[in-house]
Amino acid sequence: MADPAPAPTPPTPRQLVFVTGLRGRAVDATVEVLRGLGGRPSPAPDPPEGLVDSVGPAAWARELHDGLARRYGLRRPETRPDSLLAGAHASYDNEAHRALDRWLRTAFDEADEVVVDDPWFPWLVSLWQVAAGRAGAAIRIVVVVDDPAEHAAAEAAADDAYPEVALAAEWTNTMLTLERATRDEQRCFVSYADLVADWTLTVKNLGDALDLAFVQQAAPGQMIRASEAAPTRPETPRDWSDLAVPADIAGMADATRATLLRLAADRHDAEALAEADRLRARFTERHDLAAATVRSSIIDGVKMGRRGATR
C-alpha cells in the first residue's frame, strides 16, 4: 500500500502589528525595538497621486494617514470626541483601499509580520480592518501609554502654536478613542516607563500576549539590534503645576493613564474598561461645555475666515 500523501503545510499566518499612541518618542522607541527584533517595515511603493507628499520605508503609512486626516477634516491637536465619525468615512475611500492593497501585497511578499506605526490609527481602524482582511492578515495592536503631562510639555515646546491645555486634551481624547476603537481587537497596552526600565521583559510580555513569533523567536543578533534601539533615559514624572492646564483636564488625563495601565496589567479588566467608558463620557461633557462657552468666538472666527479679514 502506498504511503499516504503528506498533509499540506498550512500557510504561515500573516500579522499586521500596529504600534500606536501619541506621536512622539514613546511610539518611535517601541517601533524601533520591535523592528530590531525582526518586525519588518514595509517597502514603499509608488504613492497614490495627490494623497501623499513623500514616502520612505518607515514613513509611508504615516504619510498616507496624514493625507487622509487632511481629507476628512482631522487635525492636531484633535480634541473632538466625535472625530471618530469623521475618520470612519475613510473606510469608504476607494483610493485609500487601492493604496493599502498595493502596500500590503509588497509588504507580505517580504515578511509575514509587518510593523506599522502611526498616531492617526485610532481614527482609521475600520479602514485597516478591511484592508487586513483582504490581505489575509491578522491585526495585532500595541498601545504605548506615555506621560500626558510630558506629552503636553514636549509638544508645546516643539511648537508654541499648540496650547498646553489643548495638548493635554488631545492626549486624553486620543487614548480614550484608541481604547474604544480597538476593544474588539487583539491588543496589548505597554507602559513607556516599563519599556525604559526593562525593555526585554516588557517586550517579552507583549510578544506573548499577542503571540508574535518574531519576538518569541528573536535570534541573539536581533536582540543586540533591539537593545541598541531601546530607550535608556529613565522616565521622570512630569508635574502639571508648571503647565497651563486646568485641574479637571489634568485629572482626567491622569485618570485615563491609570486606567490604561490597569489594562496593561490585565487587558480583560472589566472595571478598567467600564472606567474608560466613564472617562470618555466625562471628557465629552467637558469638551461640549467648553465648545458652548466659546461658541460666539468660533462663529466669529469662521465668518472672519470666510471674509479673509484680519483684525
Image (cartoon, rainbow, N blue to C red):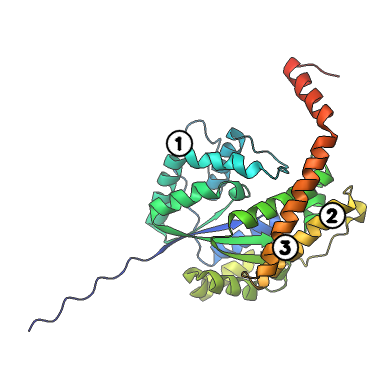
Q: Which mark is residue 250?
A: 2
Cα separation between marks 1 and 2: 39 Å
Q: Nearer the viewer, residue 123 or 204?
A: 123
Q: In the image, is residue 54 above or below residue 183?
A: above
* Residue found at x 75% / y 56%: 279
CA–CA distance in space, label 3 to label 2? 17 Å
Which image quarter: residue 194? Answer: bottom right
Task: Of the two numbered discs 1 and 3 on the same chain, state the one appearing first in sequence.
Answer: 1
Q: Is residue 168 visible?
A: yes
Q: Are marks 3 and 2 in contact (CB under 8 Å)?
A: no
Q: Residue at x 58, y 74 (%)?
A: 204
Mark 2 closeness class: few <14, some 14–19, many ≥20 residues within 10 Å: many
Disc sitting over residue 95 in the figure: 1
Disc 1 residue type?
A: Glu
* Residue 223 pos. (x, y %): 56, 72
Three-letter code, disc 2: Ala
Q: Position of 259 compared to 205: left or right?
A: right
Using residue 101 as the reference point, say whether residue 202 is left or right of it.
right
Residue at 45% in and 45% down: 100
The residue singled out by tag 3 in the image is 275
Question: Which residue is found at the position 59% from the left and 53% from the top?
Answer: 181
Question: Residue 34 versus residue 10: which sits nearer the camera?
Answer: 10
